[in-house]
Amino acid sequence: MDSDKIKIWGSRVKVDALSKVAEIEEAEKDKMRVKCKKIVDHGINVFINRQLIYNLPEQIFAEAGVMAIEHADFDGIERLAAVTGGEVASTFDHPELITLGECEVIEEVCSCLRTPIMKSWWSEKELFLVLKMYYSG
């Protein structure tokens, strides 16, 4: 979700008016809206991402009733996919080709180390999974 964010501070853009920069930013936001819509169109209610999720996509997901979880570690996502019967997706153009996982409960708790942990219980296989979520900073 962070690869589409335009990084104006780290690039040079030559324009004849400041309004052109605003147009570029709006075009980037439109691309992000389209990408988020593709994700939401999968019929999900939770989206787990390995990277940072910026405010705009987080807002789009919230408005669509999708919980967004960021900074998940790769091994945890692989285990979560295996336990829930889903698969890890990197492209979202064809929802019919992606198998979604299912679980009954997702909750966030904090340990004494202040590391958020996501717990998922899937009753059919009676498996319990702990996926550590790391904050940057």
Image (tube, rainbow, N blue to C red):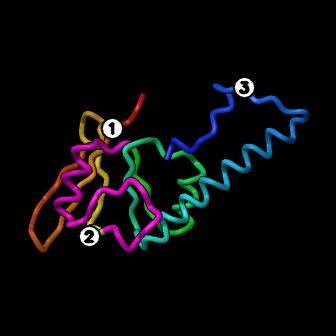
The residue mark sitting in front, 2 or 3, is 3
Give the x, y percent position of residue 17: 90, 35
- Crowding around mark 3 (Cα neighbors within 10 Å: few <14, some 14 to 19, many 20+) is few
- What is the C-alpha distance between the residues marked 3 and 1? 32 Å
Q: Identify the residue at the far left of this view.
A: 126
Q: Is residue 116 above or below residue 66?
A: above
What amino acid does circle 2 point to?
Glu
Give whichever of discs 3 and 1 has the lower sequence position.
Answer: 3
Kindly indicate whether the residue at mark 1 contacts the one at mark 3 (C-beta within 8 angstroms). no
Q: In the rendered view, does 105 fall on the left or right side of 9?
A: left
Which part of the image, by quadrant, shows the C terminus?
A: top left
Res 54 quadrant in image: top right
Question: Residue, x 23% and y 47% (percent of image)?
Answer: 76
Q: Using the numbered discs, state the Cα–Cα distance from disc 1 to disc 2 in whole angstroms.
A: 23 Å
Question: Who's the residue at 42% across and 42% down the image?
Answer: 51
| Residue nearest the viewer, comparing 136 with 49 | 49
The residues colored magenta run 71-98
Name the outermost residue toward the right: 16
Q: Earlier in the sequence, mark 2 or mark 3?
A: 3
Q: Is residue 121 above or below residue 110?
A: below
In the rendered structure, the answer to whether residue 47 lies left or right of residue 110 reads: right
Residue where numbered disc 3 is placed: 12
The residue that label 1 is drawn on is 134
Residue that label 2 marks: 102
Tell whether 110 sits left or right of 6. left
Of the numbered discs 1 and 2, the one sitting upstream in the chain is 2
Q: Tell whether position 78 is magenta.
A: yes
Let me know if residue 37 is in the magenta part. Answer: no
Q: Nearer the viewer, residue 9 or 93?
A: 93
Mark 1 in CB contact with mark 2 (< 8 angstroms): no
Residue type pointed to by label 3: Arg
Residue in front for this viewpoint, 38 or 53: 38
